[in-house]
Amino acid sequence: MIPFTRPSAGETYDSMGKRAVRAALEDAGIGYELIQQAYAGYVYGDSTSGQKVLYEVGLSGIPVVNVNNNCSTGSSALWLARQAVEHGAAECVLVVGFEQMKPGALQNVWNDRPLVFDRFTEAMAGAQEPADAPLAAQLFGGGGAAYMAKYGTAKETFAKISVKARRHAANNPYAVFRDPLTEAEVLASPHVYGPLTRLQCCPPTCGAAAAVLCSEDFARRHGLGVDVAIRAQALTTDTPSTFTSGDMTRVVGYDMTREAARQVYETAGVGPEDIPVVELHDCFTANELITYEALGLTPEGTAEKFVLDGDNTYGGRVVTNPSGGLLSKGHPLGATGLAQCAELVWQLRGRAEARQVEGARLALQHNLGLGGACVVTLYEKVS
């Protein structure tokens, strides 16, 4: 990945994507001519933006597929690439995700046609009062408020997640926000919705990340040292419970996450207790707290204790978002899933420097997009 930036930095998506692709190829130790397929993920951009990025690297005539799955776009592209390799359609595949974002809250681009979030806003309207806040904040803030109402969670607990994110990001040169925060500063920032204040919401960000996937046979023939593998992966979408439960935690993807995690644990033959490090989708502090339970990192109703006991950071049970997460590293939508991938690969290689989770041999990734899609990926150290 390349260092993420604020939109004011002014770098364009094609430049960012090209830099990430070249870095991934260099890391893999191969040239672009060996890539047989490519998947390009982005949310805000014209059709064939992927070709625009990749044509800056080479004109080899390979298939290029453009992917848009909201905030889970990068991981959805990774899922497609992994399937292509696993099923023998290609032996070496490139995945790139990028985003050139504008300042401010996310907004609809197309207002002359049915809105994709109609079902979600209808479900939200049946569960909570409307407010003058960005839609995503109302949805995820509503999920946090529903959790608070059910379990009596204190607002300070959510704020602690932002403090932890900044503490982790201080050691990440790729993160946008690296200055420390106090709990008081988080709580004193402008209120947005439910338990959320502004410093509990991820910022619009620009950036890019990329990965190269190959088969074992390809690696062997080309003398490539492969030290990390995808052990299991699942992509899920919404079921009726999202819209009929009346529970805002389910409206914002709890059940999608739980099912994707279940599939991954079952396929890999491991449990959440075996996972030492996780990069999860903390677009808002409320979603990080809800996701602890959806991934099975802590039993239902115990997320507050999980935070207060420090089980979500170094010295605790599982280090969550050592990169600083979306809250501090940034959230360029199409690049986020692949940036999570990069962080976890570095962790398993023992190259995360001051962020290193010692002895990690398994790493779990969670990337969520409302609309909706959730990708959970389990990586393992294989050498």
Image (cartoon, rainbow, N blue to C red):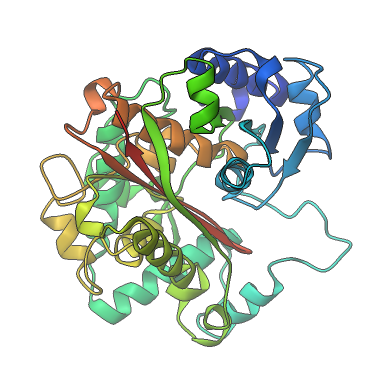
310, above or below 50, in the image: below
176, above or below 328, in the image: above
Specify the farthest residue to the right: 112
Total marks in image: 0
Q: Is residue 112 left or right of residue 255?
A: right
Q: Nearer the viewer, residue 333 or 38?
A: 38
- Quadrant in the rendering for residue 196: bottom left
Residue at image position (28%, 52%) is: 159
Q: Nearer the viewer, residue 343 or 163?
A: 343
Q: Nearer the viewer, residue 120 or 212?
A: 212
Percent coordinates x, y for residue 21 in the rendering: 61, 21
Residue at image position (43%, 53%) is: 284
Q: Is residue 184 left or right of residue 6?
A: left
Residue at image position (52%, 13%) is: 29
- Res. 2 visible in picture: no
- Quadrant in the rendering for residue 218: top right
Q: Is residue 261 left or right of residue 62?
A: left
Percent coordinates x, y for residue 267 in the rendering: 39, 60
350, above or below 42, in the image: above
Q: Where's the C terminus, which quadrant?
A: top left
- Res. 349 visible in picture: yes
Residue at image position (42%, 64%) is: 263
- Quadrant in the rendering for residue 327: top left
Percent coordinates x, y for residue 167 in the rendering: 25, 34
Percent coordinates x, y for residue 363 in the rendering: 32, 43
